[in-house]
Image (tube, rainbow, N blue to C red):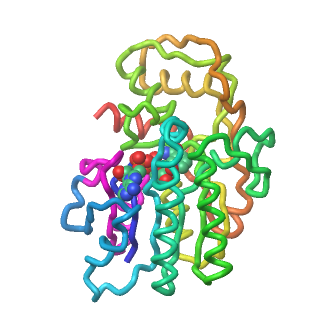
Amino acid sequence: MYVVTGGAGFIGSQLVRDLLAAGERVVVLDDFSSGKRANLQGLEGELEVIETNVVDGLWAGLGKLDPRWGTPTAIVHLAAQVSVVASLQNPLEDARRNHGATLQVLEYARQHRGVRVVLASSAATYGDVDEVPVRESSARWPLSPYGFHKFSSELALRAYATTHGVPTAALRFFNVYGPRQDPSSPYSGVISIFMKRALAGEGITIYGDGEQTRDFVFVSDVSAALRKAASQDFAGDVFNVGTGAETSINVLAQTVVRLAGSASSIGHAPARSGEVQRSCAELSHARDALKYEPSVGLDEGLAATLAWYAS
Ligand SMILES: NC(=O)c1ccc[n+]([C@@H]2O[C@H](COP(=O)([O-])OP(=O)(O)OC[C@H]3O[C@@H](n4cnc5c(N)ncnc54)[C@H](O)[C@@H]3O)[C@@H](O)[C@H]2O)c1
């Protein structure tokens, strides 16, 4: 049995689908703060959904489980306050919902021997590093509470593995995209914003010269990495999860417009301060230890995402 916190979110609902398709029993813990019931549509009856805030309701939530199911094989902890902007506005709340929630999961695993913990961490832990592609061992100077609470959560995973023998792994996601990413959220990322505008035939604005790069990884590849991490014992290992390819924002915008068959114009506005110029994952640790291999190319992933937005 797998517990997925944040299972009603964008990445979580993909993971839940993939676990169910593999014949696994799945329990979702979610407070629906940014996730949606619609993301789990069609899965009713196949999984258990417990509505709870994992910061203070994780134990009560998992206490409701049928004891015949035994303890979870793994808790995949995706529930988080996901907005960098909100973390800057309210760092203490971010500490509670990010670092604090991770400690709840770790404490549960410490007191239920054998439960693995897999954390959704982020490339935001690196801050503005000038190493491309960036390795897990690179300097980490996160720029926001969101980034440093993901980093402190990683440190907690490592300490629980070393001190208490809890099997743990943290996956640093780069820019994840795909179906069910909320296009109405102001924080949902450049791909969903470009797609929404391209499908509406509205102009697309790129901040700066558009030569800034990102590593865009399709959500099913992220789900595959999570499932691999949840099925092995690691001791606080940290893995980059991206594609290893850099895509400029100019190329991204042109590709979205082409695939959408859109007449949207692409324009530029002054660069935003504090934006990371280049970002790309170095994948050798994930390839060697996790056996992770990204399989969805940008055109294929964008086409699948566009089809979902257009439906
Ligand atoms: N999307 C990306 O590109 C990206 C990149 C790096 C890291 N991540 C991380 O991946 C994870 C999933 O992100 P996502 O993009 O699917 O976001 P999302 O907002 O779609 O999913 C987060 C889910 O967690 C739930 N949640 C939040 N706080 C909760 C709490 N205290 N208790 C219970 N449920 C709670 C939300 O309702 C939502 O369903 C997050 O930890 C995020 O920080 C995402």
Q: Which image quadrant is residue 293 in?
A: bottom right
Q: Residue 241 in the image: state x and y as whole percent.
A: 61, 54
Q: Is residue 54 left or right of residue 94?
A: left
Tell me which residue sits at (76%, 45%) in the image: 133
Q: Which image quadrant is residue 156 in?
A: bottom right
Q: Is 189 in front, or is 140? A: 140
Q: Can residue 178 be seen in this view?
A: yes
Extent of the magenta region: 11-40
Q: Residue 93 in the image: state x and y as whole percent.
A: 47, 48
For residue 144, above or below residue 47: above
> Is residue 19 part of the magenta span, yes or no?
yes
Q: How many labels does the image show?
A: 0
Q: Residue 191 in the image: state x and y as whole percent.
A: 49, 32
Point out the residue furthest to the left here. Answer: 45
Which quadrant is home to the C terminus?
Answer: top left
Q: Residue 83 in the image: state x and y as whole percent.
A: 48, 40
For residue 4, above or below residue 67: above
Q: Can residue 10 be seen in this view?
A: no
For residue 243, above or below residue 105: above
Tell me which residue sits at (62%, 21%) in the image: 272
Tell me which residue sits at (59%, 73%) in the image: 168
Which quadrant is home to the N terminus?
Answer: bottom left
Tell me which residue sits at (46%, 66%) in the image: 76
Q: Is residue 194 left or right of residue 214?
A: left
Point out the residue furthest to the front here. Answer: 92
Q: Is 72 in front, or is 226? A: 72
> Is residue 223 part of the magenta span, yes or no?
no
